Amino acid sequence: MKELQLKYGCNPDQKPARIYMEHGELPIEVLNGRPGYINFLDAFGGWQLVKELKAATGVPAAASFKHVSPAGAAIGLELSDTLRKIFFVDDVTIPLTPLASAYARARGADRMSSFGDFISLSDVCDEATATLIKREVSDGVIAPGYTDKALELLKGKRKGAYTIIKVDPDYVPPVMERREIFGVTFEQRHNDINLADDKLFQNIPTVNKVIPAEAKRDLIISLITLKYTQSNSVCYVKDGMAIGIGAGQQSRIHCTRLAGNKADKWWLRQSPKVLSLPFVEGIHRADRDNAIDLYTGSEAEDLLADGEWQKFFTHRPEPFTAEERKAWIAKNTDVALGSDAFFPFGDNIERAHKSGVKYVAEAGGSVRDDNVIAACDKYGMAMAFTGVRLFYH
């Protein structure tokens, strides 16, 4: 198949729309549903990300994409009991495979942003992974294959209209890539840089020069995630999963704050106060996620107001005070942080420190590098200057 007609482009009024190959055949097969223009943008971005994560770590990977940026990305490390609970997979009876664990992590990092996402899987989708996907609201999934049972489960989503795409895992895009904007054709080399190269982590200008193997792995995950995230962007990673992604901000400090706030939310969800929230029986997953987001934020009083909390809880929870939130966030440590370009000021490091960052990878090359290095040294952080910029538009 050389061409696939789409329902419409980015918006319903943008017709006609299609994807096609000038040479050869499309590297995908639509097994179910009718994917749209944005679906394919997310699917192809996510597929490249998870394929690269798998190649760099040797572990199955998954990504949750929304509007051409990842909401979550992770590799398939085993889940602790706490993570199983905050990702809402603790009631799943089927054993979780590494791929299923990767998906649970990718989806669970930022459940608010992942609502209605497009899923990418590095490996053949198995029954355990399909079981988790079937429970969540998403637009579709792309993977190199599906077991018969997984395909059966996924075809049952959205009244049979769920989008399922099979991608050729051996497909390699051309060296040069092109796109047309405003009638003008842009051309550039495909970004095929190897972000797992040890050379990227050899220039460590900070006093602390120790980056343990697991921290280096997390920095690599951060950089690979950023490679497919709309710039400006930063990414916080812990234990093999992105816990906070800040995408598409004009100011880098705003990226750092946005991603840091998401990382804080992920950590707050593991606190005893959140784990013990008395949800009413049968609450919808999206309503529960929204309630947790409000409860852990600055607008909790709206959720806990009379006439409102009864919609979510069997009894009114005690407020999660600002002091309690700050104390719990301070317990998060050993977080890795990547940036798609240099940090222009030390304020980014100051903000990152508040979310437990200990390891940093950024391009370097700012006229204020000394200021950024001094901020890292202030907190005993180890920072690598990679010399690589990862802008993505």
Image: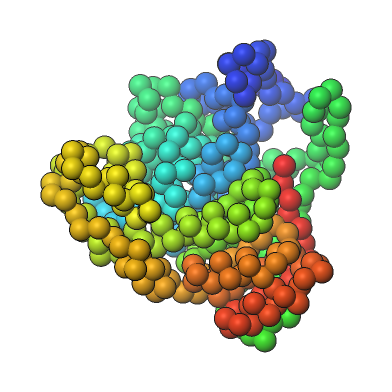
Question: Which of the 4 image quarters holds residue 168?
Answer: top right
Check the image and report above or below for 93 versus 35.
below
Residue 353 placed where, x, y %? 54, 72
Q: Is residue 150 visible?
A: no
Check the image and report above or below for 142 versus 76.
above
- Quarter in which the N terminus is drawn: top right
Depth check: 92 or 358 in front? 358
- Quarter in which the C terminus is drawn: top right
Depth check: 306 or 193 in front? 306
Question: Which of the 4 image quarters holds residue 95?
Answer: bottom left
Residue 52 placed where, x, y %? 64, 53
View extreme (left): residue: 314
Q: Is residue 193 left or right of residue 8?
A: right
Q: Is residue 178 left or right of residue 298?
A: right
Residue 165 placed where, x, y %? 54, 32
Question: Which of the 4 image quarters holds residue 230?
Answer: top right
Q: Is residue 129 visible?
A: yes
> What residue sits 50% from the left and 70% below the top?
354
> What residue sits 30% from the left and 62% below the top?
321
